[in-house]
Amino acid sequence: MTTIPTSAGTTPLLSLRALSIQFEKRRSLSDTLARRPQQVVSAVNGIDLDVMPGETLGIVGESGCGKSTLARLIAGLHRPTSGDIVFEGESVVGLKGARRRAYNRRVQMMFQDPYTSLNPRMTVRDTLREAISVHRMREGAAIDQRVDELLDLVRLPEGAAEKYPHEFSGGQRQRIGIARALSLEPICLVADELVSALDVSVQAQVVNLLIELQDELGLTVLFVAHDLRLVRHVSHRVAVIYLGAIVEIGPSEALFSRPMHPYSKGLLAAAPSLDPDARRRAPALSGELPSPLAIPPGCPFHVRCPHATELCRREKPALRPVGAGMTACHFAETIGDA
Amino acid sequence: MATQEKPVVLDVRHLRTEFGTRERPLVAVDDVSFQVAAGEILGLVGESGSGKSITLRSILGIIRPRGRVAGEILWNGQDLVPLSEAQLRRIRGREIAMIFQEPMSSLNPLLTVGLQISENLVAHTDLDARQRRARAIELLDLVGIPAARNRLDDFPHEFSGGMRQRVMIAIALASNPKLLLADEPTTALDVTIQDQILRLIQSLSRDLGMAVILVTHDMGVVAETCDRVAVMYGGRLCEIGSTADVIGDARHPYSLGLLRSIPRDVAPRTPLYSIPGAPPALNALPPGCAFSARCPVAGRECPDLRPKLEAIGTSRLVACHHLEDAQAHFGPREAAQ
Ligand SMILES: Nc1ncnc2c1ncn2[C@@H]1O[C@H](COP(=O)(O)OP(=O)(O)OP(=O)(O)O)[C@@H](O)[C@H]1O
Ligand SMILES: Nc1ncnc2c1ncn2[C@@H]1O[C@H](COP(=O)(O)OP(=O)(O)O)[C@@H](O)[C@H]1O
Ligand code: SF4
Ligand code: SF4
Ligand SMILES: [Mg+2]
Ligand SMILES: [Mg+2]
């Protein structure tokens, strides 16, 4: 269990306990005829994690490692196969009815492209009105007043309320998505690739807004992104995921300036540096993420790890305190200093 | 601008590509000139809609629907602009190959990967069936597909996104092209796979003398991979020069703004620099500097008076009326990284 206290508080807002989910792969007719066994995708494999109130937890890892699945589990869009999700001291797995709705209101998921989740035939005002009234956040005239407040909060220009989604740029649409999420007065935002589709020059606008709102409203944010520089910039802590499990977690600055796990090292080194003198001829990390249909035994990273030994192929390393954070590697101390 | 000793293979002069009617044209690429030498990697950066893909498509002569291309595209001295479709087809895919932005849409889902490579070899080489098979394995091997021999009979959907992109590169390389046009070949990929593919393109260029135009919106990719870089905005070039000059010591307000908005050497969670506003639509470009609506140092004349690309030092051109103001506004930070 990760118990690194942050300045924001000591009782976690959200705890994941041995959280796992497996998807059964759809069988084709030929699979059935050939009596091939049912294949199982292990997308999230025993994640233990405490999220502190007010913190931004960055989540990074290669495509397919389980980041979105984890985000969707937290947002209640998937039911875990095993393990538990505890929010404010109470399990939220299997919540139903009004209590499910209350949780979903307080923990809001934001998607990469709000365009697909915004109704193209509704003005921004109608979209926000609908969200506010469905959840009875305000009544009567207070609804429109709240709409104006929200648009002001996400710094959309005057007159934006009467426009349709297609009349906005990508960055502005992303802000409408944020306004809609905030209309439900959440305590926790799960941002999955929130700014990934935006141009660099516009990304900064949205990230600035997110940080500002978070400080202003005391929000807790799970920030899933593949841009490591951005994650470093916004996160208090960062978790590195490999094949559905945390391989390293720690304070953002410490993790980025001195990664301890060989996978974190490779991932960070692969990110393009702006320094033309830092050019490399050989790739930082070879191979690809193995299929989650067949997770390697022992340390799941051993097939790509330059430091792998017999022990690594046999025994799965546990996540344990190393340096400023926690790392799941048998040899973190010796490799970390290399 | 050809400061390198290697011979210039591609010389683009005053390229202009427009869509729409002749009366009210939408100009996607406007007066763009640059050169690429053998064995050189030129980066083409800019935000989405700035005209990067259209520039590449213009070179290849595949501007659809009904785009109009003007200017000169000199390929080893021969102008490609007036060539017929039949003449272009002989150059396309053989001497000049392109990797498109979306790998899945340019691979045929119904054909095995081996057949798709083979098709290209039939079209552009004299190899017989057995030689083609050997060459296909060699190519898949070259782009780092493990157990290449066993994967020739697999269909595109049986490969991961990164592998499909490599298959695309293998197909593009089948004819030993002298120029590779790579349109955001790694944008949809992980940094780890991106890194592998960029190192591959780099070594092919170095070892085979292949010229490359690499379109990207990531300044980091440019810094790590390109010899020279051209920065595009609103269909025009704002700055072009050696990577060291443009990344290490940018001068154009747009290049400076792009670099400044990338978080580095800033305290965590402090506001990042951001370029105000959004890129202009093609039908709303001013007659003068395309960047004037968002430029922090724009002067009164900028929206009306188009700045020309002018040399600064020996290996870079910049198009801006107020270079000193830009330096003062952004400070020496970008220069001293
Ligand atoms: N509903 C599902 N059914 C079957 N497999 C699934 C399902 N959802 C996700 N997976 C698989 O689970 C693994 C993790 O997927 P996930 O979308 O969480 O990855 P990610 O880390 O978000 O990747 P990316 O960076 O590409 O967004 C993948 O192998 C994916 O194919
Ligand atoms: N067939 C077309 N008809 C009209 N406009 C087009 C067409 N294709 C591209 N454009 C426009 O040309 C501009 C440049 O596009 P493109 O080169 O694809 O940009 P990018 O730099 O993102 O690759 C954009 O504004 C785009 O909308
Ligand atoms: S446990 Fe072994 S294989 Fe796994 S990361 Fe550490 S050294 Fe590499
Ligand atoms: S100062 Fe003028 S010419 Fe230079 S980039 Fe700004 S608007 Fe364009
Ligand atoms: Mg995802
Ligand atoms: Mg493009």
Image: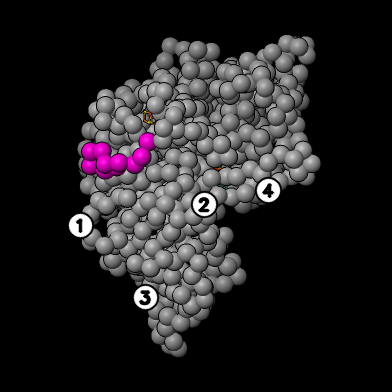
Q: Chain of mark 4?
A: A
Beta carbon at label 1 within 8 Å of ligand 1: no
- In the displayed structure, would residue B116 be above or below residue A15? above
Residue A208 visible here:
no
Q: Are marks 2 and 3 on the same chain?
A: yes
Residue at left offset 58%, top offset 31%:
B163
Q: Which residues are magenta?
A: A317-326
Q: Are marks 4 and 2 in contact (CB under 8 Å)?
A: no
Q: Chain of mark 3?
A: A
* SS type, badge 1: loop
How much space separates mark 4 and mark 1, taking CA atoms? 46 Å
Q: Are marks 4 and 2 on the same chain?
A: yes
Q: Which residue is mark 2?
A: A21
How much space separates mark 3 and mark 1, taking CA atoms? 30 Å
Residue in front for this viewpoint, B129 or B125: B129
State the image quarter where residue B185 is shown. top right
Residue at left offset 33%, top offset 31%:
A330
Crowd tier of the residue under label 1, counting other residues whose Cα lies within 10 Å: few below 14, some 14–19, many 20 or above: few
Left or right: where B128 falls relative to B328: right
How much space separates mark 4 and mark 2, taking CA atoms? 16 Å
How much space separates mark 2 and mark 1, taking CA atoms? 32 Å
Q: Are marks 2 and 1 in contact (CB under 8 Å)?
A: no
Q: Are marks 3 and 1 on the same chain?
A: yes
- In the displayed structure, would residue B216 be above or below residue A156? above
Q: Which mark is residue A7?
A: 1
Beta carbon at label 3 within 8 Å of ligand 5: no
* SS type, badge 4: loop
